[in-house]
Every structure is written in C-alpha cells, then in structure tokens.
Image (cartoon, grey):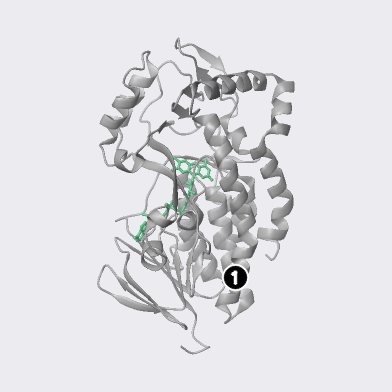
Amino acid sequence: MTASRPKRALVVGAGISGLATALRLSQIGWEPLVVERAPARRTGGYFTVFMADGFEPAKRLGVFAGINDRADPQGRFLEMDRRGRLVPAMNPAAMTGAGPQSYTVLRGDLERALYDAVHERVEIRFGVGPAAIKPGRRHVDVDLTDGSTGRYDLVVGADGLHSTVRELVFGPEDLYRRDFNHVIATCLLDRPVPGLRGGDNLLVVDTRRTVAVQAFHDHDPVAMFMYCHQWPAAEIRKRPGSALREVYGDFAGPVVPWLLDALDRAESTLFDQISQIHLAAWSRGRVVLVGDSAWSLTLYSGFGSSLGIAGGDLLGTLLAEHGDDVAGALGTWEHRLRPEVTKHQKSAHFAKNFLLPPSMPARLLRRAVVRTAASRAGGRLLQALLPASRATRTAATTSKNRIGGSV
Ligand SMILES: Cc1cc2nc3c(=O)[nH]c(=O)nc-3n(C[C@H](O)[C@H](O)[C@H](O)COP(=O)(O)OP(=O)(O)OC[C@H]3O[C@@H](n4cnc5c(N)ncnc54)[C@H](O)[C@@H]3O)c2cc1C
C-alpha cells in the first residue's frame, strides 16, 4: 500500500446507498468497485417519497437534475370504507413529515439517476457478492463469489436489510433485526385500477391489514399490501399470491380482489417483512455499513432513501477530509449521522400504527384523526402535533450541522 496510488474500496450493493457511496468515493479520488448480487440493474420498484433532506446531497453528487417528481398535483387522496365507498382522506405521507418539497418517485428513479452518473466512472460487476471478508488493520481482503479476490482500503456494505457484509463481519442478522411483525407486498400495476380516476391515491385501512394504491402523473400506479403477522419470517417464505389471499381473500368490492389478481400478473413483486436494524456501531475496522444494512428505517419513516444518499455523500466527504485516518472519518461520520437515524427509527413506530392500526380502538382513533385532518384547520393542528412532523422539522433545522455541514 503506497500513499501515491488511489485508495480502493469495495462497495457491496448497487442500490441507492451503494451507488451514492461509490459515486462520492470516485469524486474524492478513490477507486471503488461495486458488486451487485442481482444479474442486472434493477428498474421500477415500489413508490418512494424522496424527502427534501436528500435534495442537497443529491445536488452535491450531481444527480438531482435527473430525478423528477412523479406526483400528480391533481391527484386525490381517498380511503375506502367498509361498505366500499370512497371518502376523501389525508395524504399518508404527512405522517412521515413529508413536506411540500418532497418528491414522489419510484425507487428505480433514484437508482437510475445515480447509476447514470456512476457507471462510466466506476466498475460495477453484476451477479457477484462477497464470499469471505478478512479484515486486517491496514486493509481488508475479500473473496468474491465469482472466484476473484481483492485487497481494499475500505469495504462498504450497502447490501440492504438482509446484508451479507453484516452477516460476515458483524454476525447473524437475528442479533440486529427488530421485526415489526409486519409483512409488505408491493408491485407495479400494469393498468389503471377500476373505479379510480387517473391520479387517485387510495388507502383501504382495516384492523391489522391495509392496502394502498399510489398514483403517478406519468406512470401506472403501484399497489402495496401491508399486514400484521406473528411470524413474518415464515410468512415471507410462502408464495405472495397465496399468502395474500389468505389475508385479504374476504374483501368484497371491485378493488382489492382486482389488486390481488394484478399482483399475480406482476412481473416482479417485493414480498418481505418490515424490520429495522439496530447496531451499536456501523463500522468495524475498515468495514462500514451504509443505508438499510446499517439502520433500515422502514417504509414508515419515509427517510430511508434520502438518508441512504446523504449517508454515502457524507461518508465520502469525511474520508476526503481525514486523509489516511479512515478510522477517524468513520467515527465522525457515525457521530454526525446517528442522531438523524435514531430520530427516524423512532418516528417509524408512530407512523406504522397510523398506516396499519394494530387493533380496533387504534383503527377508530385513526379514523377520527383522518376526519379531523380532512378540514384545513384540523390538518394544520395535526401537523403541529405529529411527532413525525416535529422530528422532520427538527431534522430540517439541524441537518445542516449534522449531515450537510461540511460539504
Ligand atoms: C415498499 C417500500 C416502500 C418504501 N418507501 C419509502 C419511502 O417512501 N421513502 C423512503 O425514503 N424510503 C422508503 N423505503 C425505504 C427505502 O427504499 C430504502 O431505505 C432504500 O431503498 C435503501 O437502499 P439501500 O441501497 O440501503 O438498500 P437496498 O435498496 O436494499 O439495496 C441493496 C442492494 O444490495 C444488493 N445486495 C444484497 N445482497 C447482496 C450481496 N450479498 N452481494 C451483492 N449485492 C447484494 C441488492 O440486490 C440491492 O441491489 C421503502 C421501502 C420499501 C420496501
């Protein structure tokens, strides 16, 4: 290892966090290699609210111009009551504190913008992951599943909730995963939902089970099924179609049965449990976790994508500032990021009960809140009271110091 050659990093995972980290590392003069287990770049994906907190990091990375808001300004927010009637509702993203500046996108939109910026500067190998990671004091040796080996100054595990890097270096997932006992299934719909106008967003909220349709102004909608389950790890081993029919099969009316059929037709479906990751430290020596592998906020927080981008951006910035002191950079990075992550992990617990009421009283309380919010004054009052919104406002005022201050 000589001081003159560029530092080398292995970035595991070509999702939002991995691509953002690789891009920033290449911008500071490092030589990252990205390995991605999937055979090709993922496209589409579920809908994502991209919070304004991610805008500045995305601008610094030079990718913001490639991200477009797909929200339909004329789109209505509706809920379906038990008799199948559509009633006006509040935007559920308000529960996560999404401000008017947030963008509604597909996860693939963020990945595409990052990929377009990174793929000509950084080698990306698809269909490959780490087989063994051997951390040392001055470098990390890694065997990859394609049989190749390499020596790196830093290994970045950006490989999501079920991270292999975490498993290999920090220990089994069970030590760090905190399950919500919720299951999610989501897919892109291949045509508009019968009974809804283009641009209509729909929530069907029942006790312990919810269905959502998210509309876009320039794309077919996305469906999401969320439900409580005592044994989510076992549940997600079932075929999504049959698991969902066991849970939602008794829904009458045109919409939910149609959505179940649409899920069967979908080219790809995400079917997973909803869990957070809690680690006492996000790095060990020269191995660091970024994004869902480190902190998985869950969809309920609404900040996973923006903190994935902000986390990768800040990591590169601090590595540049600290020069050869990689440990110092990693320590400062975690110190700066940890309060934001903790806040959003907490706010997810509030939002989850709103989107998926765990009991009949919780559902009735939720209905009262939604009715209050439907009025202008009630909506303002609610915004003032919501912990998630408060968390976001605090984050907005402090993020300059914590996340974006040095860049
Ligand atoms: C349904 C749903 C809705 C959501 N909605 C929102 C929202 O509205 N707003 C928001 O901010 N966030 C939302 N999130 C969360 C957000 O999508 C995630 O926080 C974000 O995508 C995490 O990105 P990541 O790159 O850290 O991980 P991932 O997206 O999980 O990417 C990990 C990558 O690593 C790859 N990989 C895995 N294992 C290996 C391996 N062994 N070797 C090589 N590669 C590997 C995977 O194939 C993948 O490409 C939502 C999540 C879900 C599931």
Mark 1 highlights which residue? 331
Q: Nearer the viewer, residue 350 or 204?
A: 350
> Where residue 61 sits: x, y (%)?
58, 60
Whether residue 30 is situated above or below residue 116 in the rendered picture: below
- Tell me where residue 267 sits by quadrant: top left
> Where residue 279 sits: x, y (%)?
50, 59
Whether residue 331 is situated above or below residue 308 in the rendered picture: below
> What residue appears at the point 63 percent right and 64 percent down from the top-left corner?
335
Going by the numbered disc 1, the residue's amino acid type is: Gly
Q: Can you see residue 390?
A: yes
Count of numbered marks: 1
Q: Nearer the viewer, residue 175 or 187?
A: 175
> What residue appears at the point 57 percent right and 66 percent down from the top-left corner?
315
Mark 1 lies within 8 Å of ligand 1 (Cβ measured): no
> Where residue 50 sits: x, y (%)?
56, 44
Which quarter of the rendering shows the C terminus? bottom right
Image-based side of 230 in relation to 372, left or right: left
Q: Can you see residue 69?
A: no
Image-based side of 401 in relation to 317, left or right: right
Whether residue 261 is situated above or below residue 398 in the rendered picture: above
Q: Secondary structure at mark 1?
A: helix
- At label 1, counting other C-alpha atoms closer than 10 Å, the crowd grade (few under 14, some 14-19, many 20 or more) is some
> Where residue 222 sits: x, y (%)?
43, 33
